[in-house]
Image: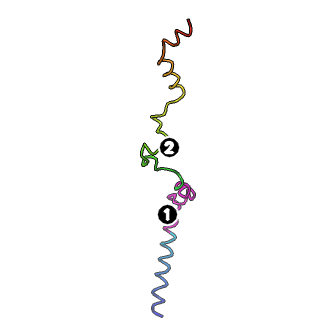
Amino acid sequence: MQIVMFLVPVMLILVALGIVLFSWAVKNGQYDDLEGPAHRILYDDDKDMIPDDARTDKPASEEQTSEQTAEVSKTANPDEDKSQKG
């Protein structure tokens, strides 16, 4: 019977501590975004680890846009443009 007199206050202190920790977590935003981490694991963040020769998509710095390709073709053969005009 003496152990019950010891365990009841200990149990009440532990329950109060749990409630305080839970309320602290809610106030600090620990439960604001419950779905974000579940979806974040699906994002592909290992592009930097793939070797350049094994990539199927080229890095943005190596790709040429259609405007750059058109500028290169215009400046590559300036004599050809003159011969077609005259």
Q: Residue at x 47, y 76 (%)?
A: 14
- How far from the left and from the top, in percent, is residue 47? 46, 47
**Nearer to the camera, 41 or 67:** 67
Q: Residue furthest top?
A: 86
- Residue 85, disc: none
Q: Circle 2 is placed at which residue position?
A: 56
- How far from the left and from the top, in percent, is residue 1? 48, 94
> Disc 2 versus disc 1: distance between alpha carbons?
48 Å
Q: Residue at x 56, y 55 (%)?
A: 39
Q: Circle 1 is placed at which residue position?
A: 24
Q: Residue at x 48, y 50 (%)?
A: 45
- How far from the left and from the top, in percent, is residue 50? 44, 48
Residue type pointed to by label 2: Thr
Q: Which type of secondary structure does the marked residue at label 2 adopt?
A: loop
**Image height check: is 8 above or below 30?**
below
Q: Nearer the viewer, mark 2 or mark 1?
A: 2
Pick whichever of labels 2 and 1 is earlier in the sequence. Answer: 1
**Image height check: is 19 above or below 67?**
below
Q: Residue at x 42, y 46 (%)?
A: 51
**Nearer to the camera, 7 or 62:** 62
Q: Is 22 colored magenta in this rendering?
A: yes
Q: Which type of secondary structure does the marked residue at label 1 adopt?
A: helix
**Nearer to the camera, 60 or 39:** 60
Residue type pointed to by label 1: Trp
**Is the C terminus in the top left, top right, bottom left or bottom right quadrant?**
top right
Q: Main secondary structure of the magenta part?
A: helix
Write the start and end of the magenta stretch as one range.
20-40
> What's the image's color scheme?
rainbow
